[in-house]
Image (cartoon, rainbow, N blue to C red):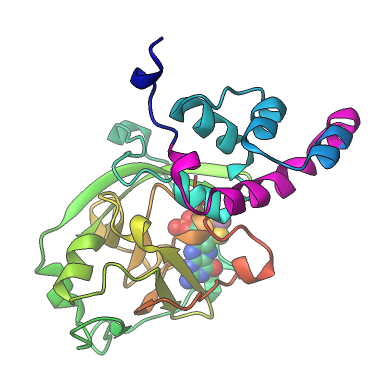
């Protein structure tokens, strides 16, 4: 093959390539069998070393991506780098919707918060032009989208459900959010909280869900609203959202602060 026609190696072109490799390498090393581990420790991690250890050619983007995918599950930065903002999560026919849909929270179903529809206001703060609070009516008046997607919980179950609501990118633009900020954080009506990266916030399937299966979002599934992201694991999808903030300061999350992976891609 003519070297000029090779796809460009995106990782090698990045100024922080060495840092990404060092982080990826640290995680990969822990998973290596002994002889490879010793070789790895002698050599340190280079592009070539990563190629050898992962058994993937790093001559092109595809090989690099495959090698990084090996370690991505344990590394937020690599996950963020691999995240493709245009790649859609699978969708399913309505016949596959789980009925009843499973409930999960860090407490029992009876403890799910009861939020009053009339007095509810969604707070918006941080790096946004318009910090006005929102009533549910105003969110319902915006263009709505619907999705039938799979929710995956790290506790070992998954289920297909149907959520409807406001595309979150529309909402962020409407409030004049700084779309170059790093994080969007969420505070919930229980003590739950989480945060996501801006590229995921702007993903076309990320919605501020107001309905479940065609009806107002039931209390146990997150009334008055939940952020639904089929590109992220269940614990990254906050229910009972009460406040949204845009920030460059890492906000963490309820499970993330107890050791769950922050990026939490599914
Ligand atoms: N406010 C709030 N959101 C939450 C949780 C929670 O305990 N409180 N649990 C998370 C977890 S671990 C999962 S799997 C899903 C469960 O959503 P479901 O009850 O609609 O299945 O909600 C996520 N969002
Ligand atoms: Mo979960």
Looking at this view, is 82 or 264 the one in front? 82
Looking at this view, is 1 or 133 the one in front? 1
Q: In the displayed structure, would residue 54 be above or below residue 97?
A: above
Residue range (magenta): 10-37
Residue 158, how many percent across, how many down? Answer: 52, 42
Kindly indicate the quadrant of the structure image that contains residue 189. bottom left
Residue 218, how many percent across, how many down? Answer: 35, 64
Q: Is residue 214 left or right of residue 245?
A: left
> At 33% from the left edge and 39% from the top edge, which residue is drawn?
87
Q: In the displayed structure, would residue 236 be above or below residue 149?
A: below
Residue 226, how many percent across, how many down? Answer: 36, 65
Kindly indicate the quadrant of the structure image that contains residue 19. bottom right
Q: In the displayed structure, would residue 77 be above or below residue 259?
A: above
Looking at this view, is 109 or 76 the one in front? 76
Prevalent SS, magenta region: helix
Residue 191, how many percent across, how many down? Answer: 54, 80
> At 29% from the left edge and 61% from the top edge, which residue is drawn?
209
Q: Is residue 56 magenta?
A: no
Residue 103 appearing in the image: no
> At 25% from the left edge and 81% from the top edge, which residue is drawn?
128
Q: Is residue 127 left or right of residue 29?
A: left
Residue 195 appearing in the image: yes
Q: Is residue 16 magenta?
A: yes
């Amino acid at each position: 093959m003519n070297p000029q026609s090779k796809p460009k190696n995106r990782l090698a072109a990045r100024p922080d390539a060495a840092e990404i490799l060092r982080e990826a390498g640290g995680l990969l090393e822990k998973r290596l069998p002994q002889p490879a581990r010793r070789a790895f420790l002698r050599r340190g991690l280079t592009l070539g070393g990563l190629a050898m250890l992962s058994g993937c050619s790093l001559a092109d983007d595809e090989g690099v991506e495959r090698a990084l995918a090996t370690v991505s599950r344990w590394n937020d930065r690599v996950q963020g780098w691999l995240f493709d903002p245009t790649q859609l999560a699978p969708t399913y026919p309505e016949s596959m919707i789980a009925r009843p849909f499973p409930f999960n929270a860090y407490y029992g179903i009876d403890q799910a918060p009861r939020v009053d529809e009339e007095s509810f206001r969604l707070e918006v703060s941080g790096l946004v032009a318009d910090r006005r609070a929102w009533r549910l009516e105003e969110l319902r008046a915006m263009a709505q989208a619907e999705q039938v997607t799979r929710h995956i919980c790290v506790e070992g179950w998954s289920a297909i459900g149907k959520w409807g609501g406001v595309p979150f990118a529309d909402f962020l633009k409407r409030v004049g959010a700084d779309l170059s900020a790093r994080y969007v954080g969420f505070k919930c009506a229980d003590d739950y909280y989480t945060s996501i990266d801006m590229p995921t916030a702007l993903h076309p399937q990320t919605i501020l869900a107001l309905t479940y299966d065609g009806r107002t979002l039931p209390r146990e599934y997150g009334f008055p609203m939940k952020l639904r992201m089929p590109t992220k694991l269940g614990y990254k999808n906050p229910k009972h959202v009460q406040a949204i903030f845009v920030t460059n300061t890492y906000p963490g999350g309820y499970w993330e602060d107890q050791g769950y992976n922050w990026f939490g891609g599914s």
